[in-house]
Image (cartoon, rainbow, N blue to C red):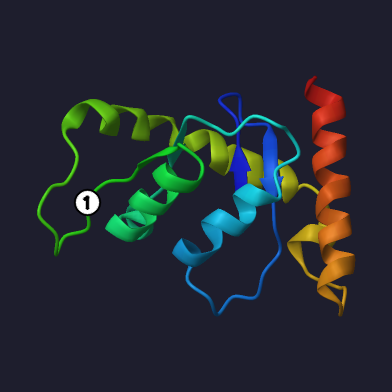
Amino acid sequence: MGIADSHGLPVALRAESASPAEVTLVEQTLEQRVVADVPERLIGDKAYDSDKLDEAMMENFGTEMIAPNRANRSPTQDGRPLRRYGRRWKIERLFAWLFNFRRLVVRYEYHAENFQGFLHLGAAIILMRYL
């Protein structure tokens, strides 16, 4: 799971197994950020449309969660914040940059700590290139 800033540069990265839902990992990933400031807004896809997540993010971090509504829910956000959803391509670009490193595309490491280390190394190289 990853969180990027408005330029698509990594702010927080976390390696986790594939079984837990991403909604449950947002707070843990945000706690592992490498910058001191908490983002004002987080943009996610339809999987992040949850009232519990919205309340927890606002209460714990003061962060607004922006996600389009799932098909089985009534609209909870107006169109103004959802216009920012168009900028979600920046996180996809971050993952494309990370997948330029062969060791991150295929997980060769047995231990998650080793893979997390290579993930942070890849993020550091990206930051060195683009800062």
Q: Quadrant of the C terminus?
A: top right
Question: Residue 126, position in %: x, y?
Answer: 80, 34
Question: Residue 95, position in %: x, y?
Answer: 64, 47
Q: Quadrant of the N terminus?
A: bottom right
Question: Residue 101, position in %: x, y?
Answer: 82, 51
At 86% from the left and 80% from the top, the residue drawn is 110
Q: Is residue 80 left or right of residue 7?
A: left
Q: Is residue 118 above or below residue 126?
A: below
At 30% from the left and 55% from the top, the residue drawn is 49
Residue placed most toward the observer, 40 or 17: 40
Visible residue check, residue 50: no
Residue placed most toward the observer, 130 or 77: 77
- Mark 1 Cα-neighbour bin, 10 Å: few <14, some 14–19, many ≥20: some
Visible residue check, residue 14: yes
Q: Is residue 57 left or right of residue 121?
A: left
Farthest left residue? 74
Residue placed most toward the observer, 48 or 55: 55
At 41% from the left and 53% from the top, the residue drawn is 56
Question: Total number of numbered labels?
Answer: 1
Q: Is residue 19 above or below residue 98?
A: below
Residue placed most toward the observer, 22 or 63: 63
Question: Residue 10, position in %: x, y?
Answer: 69, 38
Q: Which kind of residue does numbered mark 1 sit on?
A: Asn
Q: Which residue is mark 1?
A: 69
